[in-house]
Image: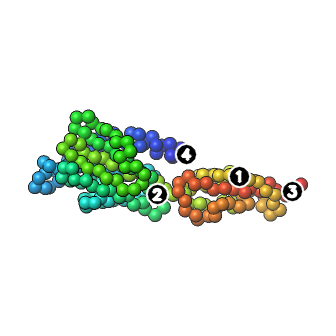
Amino acid sequence: MRRRLLLLSALVVLPFALAAGIERALAGNTVSHPQESALDVIAVSKSGYGSGTVTSVPAGIDCGKTCTHSYPHYRAATLTATPAAGSSFWGWSVSYLERDRGVVVISGACPGTGKCHVYASRDHSVVVDATFIPDCVVPKVKGKTLAAAKRSINSHECTVGTITRAASRTIKRGHVLSQAPKQGKRLTQGAQVNLVVSGGRRP
């Protein structure tokens, strides 16, 4: 939970940090092109605790390594986010760095997790953030104490779901009898793991 709160806080200040970064990029990096005065920048940044890449059509951005590219005015670029193994793509955040107004966050410009369509012009450059988050990989908690099971589940980007108790002759009181889903299952971040905990022998 603390990690997700930190992530949400970072997304609030991210457009302003990105704006400062793109201003430095524009000042320090010149793209060679015969009509350079007719070019503006689309820049991509990645956030979150997961990993992945963002590519563009037309080609130019492969982030990865190349996260900034200049396109002719009003040339639309389509961005695609591809999460790495063990991660999921959470979504886009789009901001315009306008010459007269500074940073303008475009709410709903690229909803969901599909492709993102943006363009730059004489009046603004575009800053697009792609957020990747780690998946929940269900750990083995059968046989652990309930406290240890909770710690393990949370550390694997999952959350504890329902907890029920059942009598057992073989598993000590307070230890996990069974879990669902089983260990090794890969789910979206925050997915629930339900536990059955031993209440000890029946009286």
Answer whether labels 3 and 2 touch (C-beta < 8 Å): no
Sequence-wise first label, 2 or 4: 4
Would you say residue 24 is visible in this rendering?
no
Residue behind mark 2 = 88
| Residue 36 placement, left or right of 157 | left
Between 180 and 197, the one lying in front of the other is: 180
CA–CA distance in space, label 4 to label 3: 36 Å
Picture disc at residue 163: 1
Q: Give the amino acid type for the residue marked by disc 1 in the picture.
A: Ile
Numbered label tally: 4
Sequence-wise first label, 4 or 3: 4
User: Residue drawn at (13%, 48%), measured in percent from left and top?
Assistant: 37
| Residue 1 placement, left or right of 104 | right
SS class of the residue under badge 3? loop
Answer whether labels 1 and 4 touch (C-beta < 8 Å): no
Q: Position of residue 124 (x, y in %)?
A: 23, 43
Would you say residue 88 is visible in this rendering?
yes
Quadrant occupied by the N terminus: top right
CA–CA distance in space, label 2 to label 4: 17 Å
SS class of the residue under badge 1? strand
Answer whether labels 2 and 4 touch (C-beta < 8 Å): no
Residue behind mark 3 = 202
Q: Residue furthest right?
A: 203
Picture disc at residue 1: 4
CA–CA distance in space, label 3 to label 1: 18 Å
Q: Give the amino acid type for the residue marked by disc 3 in the picture.
A: Arg
